[in-house]
Each structure stands twice: as structure tokens, then as C-alpha cells.
Image (cartoon, coloured by chain):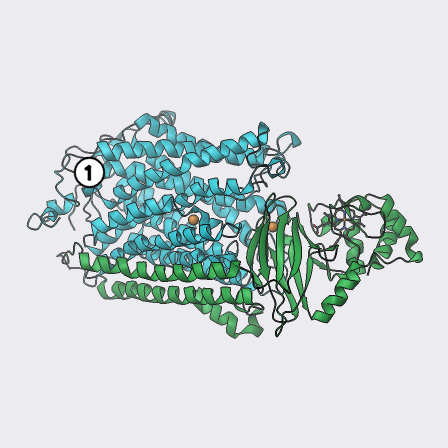
Chain colours: A cyan, B green
């Protein structure tokens, strides 16, 4: 490993400390992409705690049949808030945070293209989350008191019409996700502009790190998927408050229209959350295998293919609504098709392992966890794409298991890998390795104990979103396993937060390139100075630092 | 990973864990053909999982860093077009095969078998109970579907016409068929048939509001003869018994009659379940409790005790009224 000099930025930071208010003011008014990135991540972690607590309440309620820990209404609010929170206010901001922090560093520029728009995006996301949670205090509107929305995270019409959802809680759901969604759109525009126009001299678009490439596709997906959602939400608001009838089935509106509009956003959203994960894995796996990524080009092409196909599969969420045979067949086939580019990725990552020298540090453990868990999630996805199977298991716990393997075992594991990988860059300190391992193993075991049994309770006939169930159906034991898994994961996250707190102040100092990595962000100090780079190294290949470290066998000879 | 052992566990140790997963234990041709597709994709996916997962595991074990002093980097492979082409084509062919199987099975399953012996039932989803109307016989019942068994050359298929009175629900009886949604302002169709007499349970599978969890279905599959007898019984208007005159009167005077129908009386409400032959049903309030005198009393005193937020109000009746009404309802056989 190359020992890099201790960062200067870090020293000067600690020698002079302005008063707290001034520092807070600095953070609130900042337009620096790194600070905004960090704020996104902090926001995401806060909401992760909230969403996690909601999940645990759900799990405890389902411990036995006819349990009465929480009421039906409370439970329905819990799963709605859990889903909405995790998707819009945990995974999305975490992704935005990573992209904000890393993309400019990875392509060797000073900041994003529109720094102030960037700040706007962050504050919109945060305020969106605040609006959503305000419902707990004032959600009942004129009926007084508070109530969170209880319509599920995809808020199917006509359950959202004033006749079935009294008070304002659904409006809070609409506004919260809409405001943060607009934040997401600004983020995407900004990211595209940055990646397309601000790359370091010499870096062609075909040479950006795969994380950057995948974020580029991701940003396009956001740009295509979010505006339809916003439009649908405006239509819903008009239904609710201006007497329109888009989704009002009593007056000629269509309940299925909402489903089409929602899933036109909702399915790409799954890939919006997955592509950045793929990007992180494509950075972590090579570095910790000490090998170049296998098949950069096919990786990039597969990503673009996923982007395209994922826009055309939304109705696989609707196989039970009674569409025509032709539609069912087309959407089923398209959903199968997406397995091809996804398969390419998994094979390429696996091939990257081959012949490598695997350093099983925490980021790599999480990356391997991702590989296996995502594999399972992908395979159950194939099962769900088989229409007749979907008729049986959709809206059952099998489905719940499937998408948690994709979003938790997939996205969140990858984000955790990224967190351990780039934490030293952002803070100048390493995250503790022992606690990190403990965190990983608790999470990995807990995750499988939590979500594995759900496949079984699903095929045993347990539908999702039930606040309780009747005894004697053989569901208890699987639910109890799940709950135990949840507790294990909870402990895992305690380790994580303990680790972060401890390492922030006491962690081993990192130096600029602790992992002996190859992309540009490791060429500057940890944490980087405001201006990012003093000198941008010459970029002639996909791994500029490899070229620097191995002048005898540089990458550009092979590309 | 846990799925496969879990399933095996379920299937083998029935007595310990309860039962064979319903969808793997079909009681009719519809659910049966879904099961065969399920087995196929499950098998394909399991093989893929074992191969890919095993490869990853093998690579991790084989190639993990052993000596700390390994200073040189391993050889770099940048990719290989033939290999990448191979693992593009292999999955493509696999999913093509699956897609063809699926399309065939969708078409097969959607087209119901020949219609000579069919039974039509109109299913209307309500928050949070099921209305089953038998249009051929002119009566309707609630929450418990009774259908004739289909045996030998007497193939009886049941055509369900699915509608909703309020929000979206989904009709799901795993041992008989996959689910189909009930959508307001849209009429869906599905069919099912049962090879074995018996009782099959199902439930609403689309979140439909507060008491979605307590919207259960019971399907009784009975012999042809028993079915005919049941239909004859259901077709009759409500029984009349002088002894329960007070209960009858209270039922008509209080709001009950606005929401419930009892054929042969003045009660013609359509908002709640038809009570004409209430006591021929096994359970109350969409399968949440047995249909006994005690439960009936409890329900009418305050439906919210067992189904908080349900659409039948707590009418704050006096104990005498409740008693009288229950006595009356008990005669509705
Ligand atoms: Cu989807
Ligand atoms: Cu329901």
C-alpha cells in the first residue's frame, strides 16, 4: 500500500474553530457539493432510524395472531410511513448524497454544474420529509389532531379519495413526496449537466468510473420517471380539492389510471434505487479484488439497457387488475428481458473476483453480501414476472420478501459498502474494522432471518399489509422468526451508529488513499479541500491512479 | 436462500408447522396449472442460484488474500468478448423459454373451460365483507361461497364476475386459483373449479383500508346433491316464527333494516350483508368469528369490539333489544 501524506485541510480545520452558530450558518447556506452530499447522508440516516422504528413496531405487532400491540389504524399508518420513508427519504437522499459528494471528485472537477440548484434540491428533499411527518401532528385537518397517511406507499385510488380518506393526511403524503420529488428532479438535471460538461481534461465519457456512468443513467431515469408521478399527484390533488374526477370511480374516473401513472414512476424508481448500488459495487469489488472491472463496456451497455427496459415494464405490478392477455404477455416478457442485462452485471462482478486477491475488509463484505442477496431478489423477481405465479404470490409476503431482497439486500447493502468505503475520504478517518465486521454479520444474518421466512409465510397465503391474522394457519412461527431477525438487525445498526460516532472522533486517520484505489477521488486529501484538487492528474484511462502507480503497465495500453 | 429449505420443511413436516403451503396443494385445475408453472420457475431459479451463488462462494474462498506481504497486484483481465457474449445469450435463451411457457399458460388459464355446466356468481367487494350473488337463482349471501364439486365427467366450473362497491379489493383463495382484483367501475372475470369437496379459505389481497386484515373468504365445495339442496334452502324467503315477533319488530324499527335485507320482510337495505339465512353461515363478519349466539350478541352490541372501524355502527342498543334481535336472528336458518 502507498502511504499517503496526512491531509492539510484537516489540520487547519482543527486549529481555528469559529463559533457554533457561524459554523451552522455555514452549513445551512453552503453550496459546496461535498457539504450538501454529507447533509443528504445525515438526513438519510436520521430517517433510517425513524423508518426502522416503524418497521420494528410492525414486526412486534405481527409476533402472534390477533395481537393488539397497535390498533388497525396505527398499523396501517406505520406501513405507509415505513414504505414512503424508506424509499423517498432514506434510499433516495442517500443516493443523492453519494452522487453529490463523489461525482465531482471522480471526474476531477471543482463542484457540480449548478451549485445553488443543488442546495435547493437538498432542502426540498428535507422539507418534503418534514411535511410528511407533520401529518402526525396535524394530519386530520379540520377533524382536529394528527394522523399519518394510511393508504400504503403507492396510495391506490380510490382509497385516496375524500370519501375514504378523510382529513388531510393523504395531502401530506402527496405534498411531502411531491416536494422531495421536485428536489430529485433538480438533482438529476444538475448531475447530468455536471457529468456531461465538467469532466477533467482527457477524460472521455467512456472513461468515467462506472459509478459515474451509472449515476448518469440513473439521473436520466429520474428525469423520466418523476415528472409523471408529480403530474399524477397534481391530478390527485385536483380530485381531492377542486372537484376533478380523474380517479373518482363514482363519476367516471378510473382507478386503474392511477396504477398506470404511479407504476410508470414506480418501476423505474426501483432501478433508480438499484443503479447507484450497482455503481458502488462496480467501484468496491475491483478495488478489493485488486483487479480491473471485468468488461467495462458491457457493464456500461447493460446499464443503459436496464435504463431503457425499465421504462417499459411497469404493468408487471398490475397482473391482477385484469388487463388483456396481450398486455400481460408483453409486460411479462419485458420483465423477463431485464434479467439479461442484470445477469451480465452479476456475471461481470463475479468474473472480477476470479483470479483476484480479495481483501475482505468491511466494504468488500457488504459488497459480497449485496451480490448474493441481490441475486436472490433478482431470482424471485423472475418468478414474479411469470404471470400465473404472480397471480398467486403478488400482494403476499412473498412479494414483501422479494422487494426487500432487492432494496435492502441490494440497495442498502451496497450503500453500506459505499459508506465504509468512502467514509475515510469524507472524514479523514477510518471506520472501525471490528465493529464494521460485527455490523456486517449482524445485518447479514438478521436480514436473512427477517426476510427469508417471509417467502414462506407468503406461499402459506399471508397477504401483505394485514395488521393481524387468524391463528391456526401456520403463520406464527415464520412471523416470529422475522421479528427475531429484525431485532438482530436493530443491534447491527446500533453497532453501525456506535462505530460512526466513535470513528468520527477517535478513528484511525486515513490518509488520502487508504484502500490503494484507482479513481480520482483518492488523488486528493481526505477530506478534500473546498476546491477539491490542487492539481488534477492527467487522465488517460479509466483508472488514472493505476496508471500513476504502475507506469510500467498503464491501463491505457489495454483500453 | 432460506426459501428452498423453508419450503421443504413446510412440505415434509406438516404436523409440526401446520400445513402444506396452500398454493402447492391445489384443489382444482386452475390452481394446479399455476402450481406447475411455479415449480418450473422455482426449479430454474434454484439452479441459477446454486450455480451463481456457488461460484461466488468458491471464488471468495479460493481467491481471498492469504499472505499479508503479497505486494504485487494480480494479473489484470479487462474482459473477454466471447465470454461476455456467452453469458448474455444463456440468460436470454432461458428467459425466452420461460416467457413462452408463461404466455401459453396465461392464455390457457384465462380461457375458461366449456360453459355447459357452469355456475355464475357475482362477487361484490365491500369494505370489509364479500357479497356473493347467485343471479341464476335470485338470492345473495355473504362471505361464504358455496359451489358444487367438479368430479368425473361432471365438470363444473364457476364463473366469478368481480365488482367493487367502493375501493379495490382482491379475491384470493390460494387452493383454488390465483387472485383477481375487484375494481370499482370495472368488471373483472375469473373462473375456478374444485376437484375435492371441502372447505377452502381465502382472503382479500389488496389493501382496502382499516379492516383489510379482516376480510376473509370461505369457500365450501359440496356434492352436486348438497349444492342443489343448499340452493333450494337459500331461495326460500326468511323463516317466520311468532315467538320472536319483538325481535323482528325491533329489527325493522331500528336502522338495521336500512342496511340489511331479510327477504320476505320489509328489510331491504343493501349496504350490509343479506341476513335472510344468516344462521346457515359458519362465521360472522367476514370470517373473523364463529357464528354463535354469544358472538352474535357481542357483534350487535358493538361491532367495533372485534372489527374496529367497520362499516356497521355501534347503535348503543339496550340489552333487551339486543337480546330480542339476536333471538330473532337465530331463527333465520
Ligand atoms: Cu416493477
Ligand atoms: Cu382488502
Q: What element carries label 1?
A: loop
The image shows residue A358, relative to residue B13, as above or below, that is above
The percent position of residue A487, horizontal first and vertical second, equals 48, 55
The percent position of residue A200, horizontal first and vertical second, equals 17, 35
Of all chains, the one bearing label 1 is A
Disc 1 residue lies near ligand 1 with CB under 8 A:
no
Q: Residue furthest left?
A: A552
Q: A73 or A236: nearer the eye?
A: A236
Is A532 left, or right, of B243 in this rendering?
left
Is A197 left, or right, of B319 in this rendering?
left
Other residues around mark 1 within 10 Å, as few (<14) / some (14–19) / many (≥20):
many
Residue occupied by mark 1: A524
In the rendered image, is residue A258 in sight?
A: yes
Is A191 left, or right, of B320 in this rendering?
left
Residue drawn at x 44%, y 61% is: B104
In the rendered image, is residue A485 in sight?
A: no
Amino acid at each position: 500500500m502507498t502511504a499517503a501524506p496526512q491531509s492539510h485541510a484537516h489540520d487547519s480545520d482543527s486549529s481555528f474553530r469559529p463559533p457554533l452558530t457561524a459554523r451552522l450558518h455555514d452549513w445551512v447556506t453552503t453550496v459546496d457539493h461535498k457539504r450538501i452530499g454529507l447533509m443528504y447522508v445525515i438526513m438519510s440516516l436520521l430517517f433510517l432510524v425513524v423508518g426502522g422504528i416503524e418497521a420494528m413496531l410492525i414486526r412486534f405487532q405481527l409476533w402472534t395472531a390477533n395481537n393488539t400491540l397497535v390498533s388497525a389504524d396505527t398499523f396501517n399508518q406505520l406501513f405507509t410511513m415505513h414504505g414512503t420513508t424508506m424509499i423517498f427519504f432514506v434510499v433516495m437522499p442517500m443516493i443523492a448524497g453519494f452522487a453529490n459528494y463523489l461525482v465531482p471528485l471522480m471526474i476531477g472537477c471543482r463542484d457540480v454544474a449548478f451549485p445553488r440548484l443543488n442546495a435547493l434540491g437538498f432542502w426540498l428533499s428535507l422539507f418534503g420529509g418534514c411535511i410528511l411527518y407533520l401529518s402526525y401532528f396535524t394530519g386530520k385537518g379540520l377533524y382536529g389532531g394528527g394522523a399519518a397517511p394510511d393508504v400504503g406507499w403507492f396510495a391506490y385510488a380510490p382509497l385516496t379519495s375524500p370519501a375514504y380518506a378523510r382529513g388531510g393526511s393523504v395531502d401530506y403524503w402527496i405534498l411531502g413526496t411531491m416536494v422531495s420529488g421536485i428536489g430529485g428532479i433538480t438533482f438529476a438535471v444538475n448531475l447530468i449537466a455536471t457529468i456531461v460538461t465538467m469532466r477533467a481534461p482527457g477524460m472521455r465519457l467512456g472513461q468515467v468510473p462506472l459509478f459515474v456512468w451509472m449515476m448518469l443513467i440513473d439521473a436520466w431515469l429520474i428525469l423520466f420517471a418523476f415528472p409523471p408521478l408529480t403530474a399524477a399527484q397534481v391530478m390527485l390533488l385536483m380530485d381531492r380539492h377542486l372537484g376533478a374526477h380523474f380517479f373518482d370511480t363514482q363519476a367516471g374516473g378510473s382507478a386503474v389510471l392511477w396504477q398506470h401513472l404511479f407504476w410508470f414512476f414506480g418501476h423505474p424508481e426501483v432501478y433508480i434505487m438499484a443503479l447507484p448500488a450497482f455503481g458502488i459495487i462496480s467501484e468496491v469489488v475491483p478495488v478489493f479484488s485488486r483487479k480491473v472491472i471485468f468488461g467495462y463496456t458491457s457493464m456500461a451497455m447493460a446499464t443503459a439497457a436496464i435504463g431503457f427496459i425499465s421504462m417499459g415494464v411497469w404493468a408487471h405490478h398490475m397482473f391482477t387488475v385484469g388487463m388483456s392477455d396481450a398486455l400481460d404477455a408483453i409486460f411479462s416478457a419485458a420483465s423477463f428481458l431485464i434479467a439479461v442485462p442484470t445477469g451480465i452485471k452479476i456475471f461481470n462482478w463475479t468474473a472480477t473476483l476470479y483470479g483476484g486477491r480479495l481483501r475482505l475488509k468491511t466494504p468488500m463484505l457488504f459488497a459480497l453480501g449485496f451480490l448474493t442477496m441481490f441475486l436472490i431478489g433478482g431470482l424471485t423477481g423472475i418468478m414474479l414476472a411469470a404471470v400465473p405465479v404472480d397471480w398467486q404470490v403478488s400482494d403476499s409476503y412473498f412479494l414483501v420478501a422479494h422487494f426487500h431482497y432487492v432494496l435492502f439486500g441490494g440497495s442498502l447493502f451496497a450503500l453500506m459498502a459505499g459508506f465504509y468505503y468512502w467514509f475515510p475520504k469524507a472524514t479523514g478517518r477510518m471506520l472501525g474494522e471490528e465493529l464494521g465486521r460485527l455490523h456486517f454479520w449482524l445485518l447479514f444474518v438478521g436480514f436473512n432471518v427477517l426476510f427469508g421466512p417471509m417467502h414462506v409465510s407468503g406461499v402459506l397465503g399471508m397477504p401483505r399489509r394485514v395488521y393481524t391474522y387468524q391463528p391456526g394457519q401456520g403463520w406464527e412461527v415464520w412471523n416470529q422468526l422475522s421479528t427475531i431477525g429484525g431485532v438482530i438487525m436493530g443491534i447491527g445498526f446500533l453497532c453501525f451508529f456506535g462505530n460512526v460516532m466513535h470513528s468520527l472522533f477517535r478513528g484511525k486517520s486515513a490518509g488520502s488513499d487508504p484502500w490503494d484505489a484507482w479513481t480520482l477521488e483518492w488523488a486528493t486529501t481526505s477530506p478534500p479541500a473546498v476546491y477539491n484538487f490542487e492539481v488534477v492528474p492527467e487522465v488517460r484511462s479509466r483508472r488514472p491512479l493505476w496508471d500513476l502507480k504502475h507506469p510500467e503497465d498503464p491501463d491505457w495500453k489495454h483500453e | 436462500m432460506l426459501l428452498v429449505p423453508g419450503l421443504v420443511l413446510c412440505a415434509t413436516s406438516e404436523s409440526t408447522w401446520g400445513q402444506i403451503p396452500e398454493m402447492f396443494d391445489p384443489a382444482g385445475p386452475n390452481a394446479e396449472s399455476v402450481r406447475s408453472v411455479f415449480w418450473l420457475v422455482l426449479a430454474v431459479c434454484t439452479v441459477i442460484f446454486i450455480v451463481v451463488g456457488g461460484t461466488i462462494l468458491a471464488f471468495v474462498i479460493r481467491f481471498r488474500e492469504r499472505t499479508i506481504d503479497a505486494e504485487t497486484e494480480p494479473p489484470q483481465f479487462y474482459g473477454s468478448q466471447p465470454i461476455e457474449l456467452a453469458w448474455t445469450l444463456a440468460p436470454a435463451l432461458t428467459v425466452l423459454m420461460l416467457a413462452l411457457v408463461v404466455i401459453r399458460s396465461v392464455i390457457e388459464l384465462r380461457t375458461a373451460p366449456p360453459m355447459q355446466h357452469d355456475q355464475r356468481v357475482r362477487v361484490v367487494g365491500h369494505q370489509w365483507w364479500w357479497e356473493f350473488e347467485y343471479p341464476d337463482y335470485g338470492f345473495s349471501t355473504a362471505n361464504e361461497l358455496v359451489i358444487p364439486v367438479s368430479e368425473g365427467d361432471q365438470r363444473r366450473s364457476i364463473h366469478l364476475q368481480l365488482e367493487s362497491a367502493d375501493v379495490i379489493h382482491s379475491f384470493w383463495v390460494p387452493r383454488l386459483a390465483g387472485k383477481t382484483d375487484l375494481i370499482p367501475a370495472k368488471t373483472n372475470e375469473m373462473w375456478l373449479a374444485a376437484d375435492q369437496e371441502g372447505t377452502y379459505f381465502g382472503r382479500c389481497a389488496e389493501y382496502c383500508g382499516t379492516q383489510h386484515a379482516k376480510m376473509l373468504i370461505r369457500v365450501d365445495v359440496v356434492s352436486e346433491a348438497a349444492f342443489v339442496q343448499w340452493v333450494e334452502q337459500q331461495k326460500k324467503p326468511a323463516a317466520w316464527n311468532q315467538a320472536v315477533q319483538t325481535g323482528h319488530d325491533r329489527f325493522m324499527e331500528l336502522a338495521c333494516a336500512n342496511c340489511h335485507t331479510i327477504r320476505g320482510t320489509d328489510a331491504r337495505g343493501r349496504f350490509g350483508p343479506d341476513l335472510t339465512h344468516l344462521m346457515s353461515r359458519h362465521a360472522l363478519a367476514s370470517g373473523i368469528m364463529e357464528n354463535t349466539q354469544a358472538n352474535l350478541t357481542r357483534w350487535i352490541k358493538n361491532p367495533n369490539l372485534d372489527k374496529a372501524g367497520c362499516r356497521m355502527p355501534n347503535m348503543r342498543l339496550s340489552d333487551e333489544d339486543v337480546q330480542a334481535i339476536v333471538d330473532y336472528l337465530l331463527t333465520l336458518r
